[in-house]
Image (cartoon, rainbow, N blue to C red):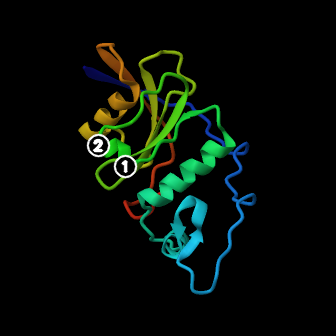
Amino acid sequence: MYFRESRINDIDITAHDIDLTAHDITTTISKNSLNWIPNLHLTMSDKNTILHPAGWLTDTIIDAAQKLLKQQFPHIQGLQQVALGLTMSFEMQSGEFLQILHCNNHWFTVSSMGSNQTSAVNVFDSMYDSIPALGKAQIACLLKTSNDSILVNIMRVQKQVSYLMCVF
């Protein structure tokens, strides 16, 4: 299987329809509790990581964000635990999907939404303009296609200024 990459130059990505607030999540936090948001498996340490400008996002934090997205947009496939990508254990996605992937100490997003081809995905990456081998393997795992190739559209997004300053 081979990957064909293309560049998409004119795209407007807005998030005005996405409300990522957790206002409907109720939690009980005691002063000595390590839990911050128990139903998302987030701890006080995760909270500190999120609030710290140089905090490194973990799979637990990304999984929690994907869980919130899945609750708000139940019709969208994907949003599986990111650790499944490291073992190539993603469930096959046959419809429109969104998935955050982790590769080489870096997070990026892949989606089939807006693509009118069955073996095509859009990649949103704030750091790189190409996909490493592990990222390609994770995409292939998500699609589990019998096609000879997968079209990967590298979408034009705002680039981060350094590896420490993620715009994710």
Secondary structure found at label 2: loop
Relative vertical location of residue 67 with respect to residue 48 in this rendering, above or below: above
Q: Which mark is residue 87?
A: 2
Q: Would residue 155 appear left or right of 127 to someone viewing this image?
A: right
Local secondary structure at mark 1: helix
Please state which of residues 101 and 30 is positioned toward the viewer in this rendering: 30
71 or 38: nearer the viewer: 38
Residue 7 percent location from the top left of the image: 42, 28
* Amino acid bearing label 1: Ala
Q: In which image quadrant can residue 121 be found?
A: top left
Res. 167 visible in picture: no
Decide: is 148 above or below 113. above
Q: Position of residue 101 (x, y in %)?
A: 40, 44
Residue 68: % across, % down: 62, 50
| Circle 1 residue | 83
Q: Residue at x 39, y 30 (%)?
A: 142
Disc 1 to disc 2: CB gap under 8 Å: yes
Is 39 left or right of 112, judged from the image as shown?
Answer: right
Alpha carbon distance from label 1 to label 2: 7 Å
Number of residues whose C-alpha sits closer than 10 Å to that of mark 1, classed few (under 14), some (14–19) or many (20 or more): some
Q: Is residue 160 visible?
A: yes
